[in-house]
Image: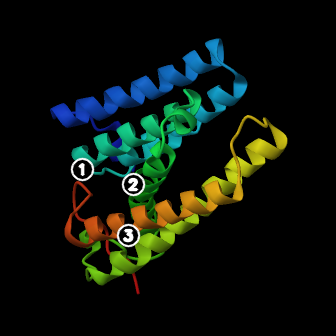
Amino acid sequence: MKEDFLRPPRTAAEWAADGLRVVGVLAVIAAAVWLKPTDAGIAALTLPALMLPRMLGLRPWFDVVTCVVVLVAAWSNVLDLYRTITGWDLLLHGVCTGVLAIVLAVVIERTGVAALTRDAGVRPRTPLVMLPLLALAISAVWEMIEWVGWAFLSDDIFVTYQDTIGDMVLGGVGGVLAGALLAWTRVERRGAPTVAA
C-alpha cells in the first residue's frame, strides 16, 4: 500500500486522480473557513474515500471515477442538490454506494478476509452475490451517519423513513451493478494477492 501511495503519477488519468485528491483537500479547507461546521465535516468525510484508491493501487480509470463520484456526492449535500433536484439523491446513492462497495471489496481482499474480485481469480458469481451485500451494509452505515447527524448535530439533515428505505434500495441496486462490473473487469493495477482458504 505504501508503495502504491508514494508511486508518482505517470499517465493523464493518474494525474487527474491526484488532482481530484488535491481538490478534495482544498475543499475541506474552504468549507472549514467559509461554510458551516457540518459542511466542513461532510467535505472531510470524502478524504478516506479519495485516498484509498491510490493506496490500494487501483487502475487509474477507476481511481478517477471514485474521486469524481465521492466529490459529487459530498458537494451535492453541501450545495443542497439532493433536495432541489428530483431523483438526484437516489441516483447518487446508487452510484456512490456501488463504487464504494468495489473499494471495500478490494480492502477485504487485501486484508486476507475473502477473495472477491476477478483479480484474485474468483468465479464471476462471487462478486455478483457479495457486492450487493457489501453495498447494503454501506447503505445502512450511511443512513446511520445521517441519522446521528440529524439527531445530534443539525435538524437540517433530511431523514425520513421513505428516504432511508429508498436510499438503501438504490444502494443495493448500485451493489448489483458493482458486482456485475467486478465479475468481468479488473480494477487493480496488478493481480491481487491470493487469499488463503
Q: Is residue 63 something that shows in the picture?
A: yes
Residue 4 picture quarter = top left
Residue 8 picture quarter = top left
Of the residues under marks 1 and 3, which one precedes in the sequence?
A: 1
Gap in angstroms between the C-alphas marked 1 and 3: 21 Å
Q: Amino acid at mark 1?
A: Arg
Farthest-out residue, right = 152
Expressed as whole percent of the image width and height from the top left, the position of residue 14 reads 24, 36
When the figure is inspected, residue 172 is found, relative to residue 24, above or below; the finding is below
The disc at residue 59 is: 1
Q: Do the residues under discs 1 and 3 have CB atoms within 8 angstroms?
A: no
Quadrant of image for the C terminus:
bottom left
Q: Write the residue at 39% across / 42% down.
A: 69
Q: Write the residue at 26% across / 83% down.
A: 123
Q: Do the residues under discs 2 and 3 have CB atoms within 8 angstroms?
A: no
Q: Write the residue at 70% across / 49% down.
A: 159
Farthest-out residue, bottom = 197
- Direction from residue 194 to residue 73 in the image, left or right: right
Viewer-nearest residue: 170 or 57: 170
Q: Amino acid at mark 3?
A: Val
Q: Give the number of the mark in front: 1 or 3.
A: 3
Gap in angstroms between the C-alphas marked 2 and 3: 11 Å
Viewer-nearest residue: 149 or 182: 149
The disc at residue 99 is: 2
Category of crowding for the residue at label 2, using alpha-carbon neighbours closer than 10 angstroms: few (below 14), some (14–19), many (at least 20): many
Q: Amino acid at mark 2?
A: Val
Q: Write the residue at 44% across / 56% down.
A: 94
Q: Which residue is mark 3?
A: 176
- Direction from residue 195 to residue 45 in the image, left or right: right
Disc 2 element: helix
Disc 3 element: helix
